[in-house]
Image: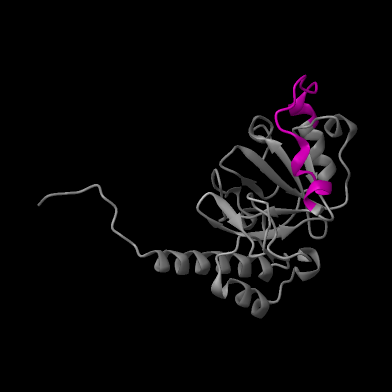
Amino acid sequence: MQWTSRQPFVPPALLDRLDRGRLRRAALRYAAQGWQVTPGAYLAGHRFHCGRPGCPITACHPALDAWAAAATVDPGRIARWWRRQAHTVLLPTGSRFDVLEVPAALGRQLPALGPVAVTAAGRWMLLVGPGRPLRPELENRIDVVRHGIGSWIPAPPNRLLDGPIRWTVAPEQVDWRMPDAERVQELLVVAAGPAPGRPLIPRQLSTSRRAA
């Protein structure tokens, strides 16, 4: 018998249907726990498409202008959104949880207190209780971003331009509970030490920019 390393051909239409099903199931799973979801642009080739004529945004972004108002836990509405397109699954922040987005060098030092998602680019998204602003020690760091009211994060199992998003601590592992934001920030301050002299990323992922 001769073995081959070539992958079997899968028709694009079937791949799209599988992606839609996978993302729809994820959206419904989050909604079942009371986490609102809203559809994001879908990845096609090397850019994200939202369907709005002339949209210049090529990175991940909401598919709807009024994405925050449209966010829902209604399974029927969610099923309709993902019926025809493999939208990314976006989780609005500021209600059930906030998100502290940090570089991997900080995220790896923290204990598993709550859900943690990681991007292929090495950004760690720590889900915490809502409403707590960044401590001054973190506010002065350009590589630490808080997502609160008016912002969102792409959730696993989405795929961004640089690769997939995955849970390193899945919500089920912590019974879908959020850790105290102040406690997590205290740990981040200890792990971070002095603010870096040179920013690791621009603060373009901040709540104010995403809400714009």
Q: Quadrant of residue 54?
A: bottom right
Magenta stretch encompasses residue 64: no
Q: State left or right for residue 29 relative to residue 183.
A: left
Which residue of the protein is positioned furthest toward the left in this rendering?
Answer: 1
x%, y% of residue 155? 63, 55
x%, y% of residue 78? 65, 74
Residue at image position (36%, 65%) is 11
Q: State left or right for residue 193 relative to residue 30.
A: right
Residue at image position (64%, 62%) is 50
Q: Quadrant of residue 190?
A: top right
**Is residue 66 in view?**
yes
Foreground pick, 55 / 89: 55
Foreground pick, 184 / 90: 90
Which residue of the protein is positioned furthest toward the front in this rendering?
Answer: 54
Magenta stretch encompasses residue 204: yes
Number of labels in the image equals 0
**Is residue 180 in view?**
no
Foreground pick, 170 / 62: 62
x%, y% of residue 30? 65, 65
Q: Up-down: is 201 above or below 58?
A: above
Figure coloring: one colour
Q: Up-down: is 197 above or below 90?
A: above
Which residue of the protein is positioned furthest toward the bottom in this rendering?
Answer: 76
Foreground pick, 37 / 48: 48
Residue at image position (61%, 53%) is 170
Residue at image position (49%, 64%) is 19
x%, y% of residue 177? 73, 56
Range of residues picked out in magenta: 189-210
